[in-house]
Image: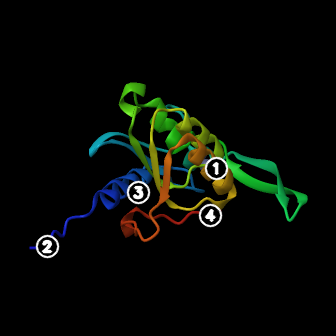
Amino acid sequence: MTDTRKDWDTYFMDIAYMVSTRSRCSRRHVGAVLVQGKKLLGTAYNGAPMGMPDCSEAGCMISEEVSLVHIDGEQQMLKKQRCIRTIHAEQNLLLFTDRIDREGSTVYVSDEPCWTCANMLANSGIVEIVFHRSYPKDTDKVTQMMNSKGIVFRQLASYEPPTDTLTTVSN
Ligand SMILES: [Zn+2]
Ligand SMILES: [Zn+2]
């Protein structure tokens, strides 16, 4: 008899996507879960601090960021708009879990972490990050850091999220 159950990667990524549906930011719905072995230790999504108006009530708080990058030996300015009203899912996950639980654990997150979240995750005790959707802007520097920290950083390329967890977001 074949085992038709979902594999663990799919199982935990499905939960991350389920959690992401709680987000009220119209730009991006991100879900993250903390897993130790096969045990779920925490869930989090991107959102405003408790008791504060969220993006659906107060609108996104848009900030424009500029980063200097080198393309073909030339320095260029890359501009990117992002919503700074919300605490990112990965950061909320760190706020709601204990360091002792995080030691040696894995984070499943629907979207590739931004540089700030990756930086915090790299210092959080976790040993593996599994993500699904790409966030190309920070991929190079995040991958480089994870390599030098010895943190497994992998994308579930062939994964397909449950359709009822997907929301249309404007970027
Ligand atoms: Zn927002
Ligand atoms: Zn982030």
Amino acid carrying label 3: it is Tyr
What's the CA distance linking mark 4 and mark 2? 41 Å
Amino acid carrying label 4: it is Ser
Q: Residue 113 appears at what percent x and percent y?
A: 57, 49
What's the CA distance linking mark 1 and mark 3? 26 Å
Q: Counting residues from the N terminus, which is met first, the one under dot 4 or under dot 2?
A: 2
Q: Residues within 10 Å of mark 2 (few under 14, many from 20)?
A: few
What's the CA distance linking mark 4 and mark 3? 18 Å
Q: Nearer the viewer, mark 1 or mark 2?
A: 1
Amino acid carrying label 2: it is Thr
Q: Nearer the viewer, mark 1 or mark 3?
A: 1
What residue is rendered at 73% in x and 53% in y?
Answer: 81
Q: Residue 153 appears at what percent x and percent y?
A: 50, 52
Quadrant holding the N terminus: bottom left
Q: Counting residues from the N terminus, which is met first, the one under dot 1 or under dot 4?
A: 1
User: Which mark is on residue 2?
Assistant: 2
Residue 39 shown left or right of residue 110 in the figure: left
Q: Residue at label 1?
A: 144
